[in-house]
Image: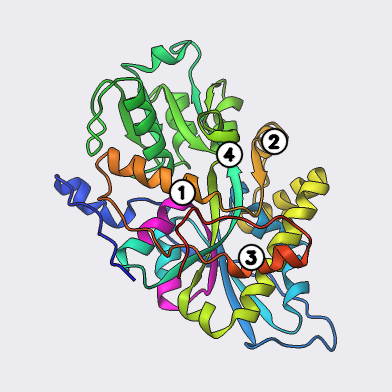
Amino acid sequence: MSAARPLTALRTIAVIAALPLLLTACGYGSESTDDGKQTKVAAGAKKLSVDEVKIGYFPNLTHATALVGVQEGLLQKELGGTTFKASTFNAGPSEIEALNAGSIDIGWIGPSPAINGYTKSNGETLRIISGSASGGVKLVVNPKKIKSLKDVKGKKIATPQLGNTQDVALLNWIADQGWKVDADSGKGDVSVFRTDNKITPDAYKSGSIDGAWVPEPTASKLVAEGGKVLLDESTLWPDNKFVITNIIVSQKFLKEHPDVVEAVLRGSVKTNEWINANSEKAKTSANAALEELSGKALPAEVLDPAWKSITFLDDPLASTLNTGAQHAVKAGLLEKPDLKGIYDLAPLNKVLKAEGKEQVDDAGLGAE
């Protein structure tokens, strides 16, 4: 396997200090939490090759496959007598660290931390084994200050974190407008403010920012505060689809317990099928899971539009992950990576074939 190049050196002390946080999924923090969900194993259910599988995901609507799969018992059903331990994470780096340390075996995660984890390990720690969700990212602005896309120039726009998935997307969109921004400092024709999603709505209300390029449900929270959706990122991608959540696995676990990996993937595929066939029930289930994890459910004015903007699917949309990596390179946040081998979709395609579903492609980035 060829070695992948590491992140390029950044120029300022502040950015160097932030390096472990680069290319994360959402920027909600970095702690992990045992989600406390008790698995219910059917009497007489047969164990697989391991007693317990440890899974990780975010308490976020874009991770609803995991939220609903756990909440509705769909993952446990496929695991039989093998139980699972679920942990929730607030940012990509901590989940990657947990995977590397063996604290989790399989995780739902965004594309940028998956790329970062793969390249930093020279392609030796993880594989992407499935997609999970697409979309759910919007540019929401103050309609009194920004009435059209050209009005974004000269304004203050927030992203969740330096170099994260949405930050890269905004920087690429700015460049496509012919405007210039220094990626490290965020200064230029547009002022890019890296702001934790938890405080972005307050920053918007106070007038500290004029808008934000953010994932759901933060985007819908801004709309509830009077913001206007100026651009849905999905419109910038072929077929209006781009990866927002993948499923990753440690290479060691994949090699030693392929039966468990297949069971989790069957659970994911069947969960996505159930979500798409029962959208309202699934939305309620996901919100109930969020309430259990955070202590607070999302209000309908936030939940409903956020849910509608996310597509749940098994296809990892591999070509869009590669394009996202190219955007990060263009922005100067990533040296050109060698992503060959980041995918192993053989287990997923085996599951899809057995379910009578169309198989998916790795865009030439599969493991040999």
Q: Position of residue 299 (x, y in %)?
A: 69, 37
The residue identified by callout 4 is: 241
Element type where label 3 sits in the image: helix
Q: Residues within 10 Å of mark 2 (few under 14, many from 20)?
A: few
Three-letter residue code for mark 4: Lys
Q: CA distance from mark 2 to mark 3?
A: 26 Å
Asked if residue 288 lies left or right of residue 128, the reply is right
Asked if residue 186 lies left or right of residue 227, the reply is left
Is tag 4's residue or tag 1's residue first in the polypeptide sequence? 4
What mark, if any, has residue 308 been given in the picture? 2
Three-letter residue code for mark 1: Leu
Asked if residue 329 lies left or right of residue 166, the reply is left
Three-letter residue code for mark 2: Lys
Q: CA distance from mark 4 to mark 1?
A: 11 Å
Residue lying at 58% horizontally and 70% vertically, measured from the top left:
55
Check if residue 107 falls in the magenta segment. yes
Give the residues drawn in magenta, as a range: 99-117
Quadrant that contains the N terminus:
bottom left
Q: CA distance from mark 2 to mark 1?
A: 22 Å
Residue that lies at the very extreme toward the right in this rendered image: 43
The residue identified by callout 1 is: 321
Report the front residue among 201 and 11: 11
Quadrant that contains the C terminus:
bottom left
Q: CA distance from mark 3 to mark 1?
A: 18 Å
Element type where label 2 sits in the image: helix
Q: Is residue 302 visible?
A: yes
Is tag 3's residue or tag 1's residue first in the polypeptide sequence? 1
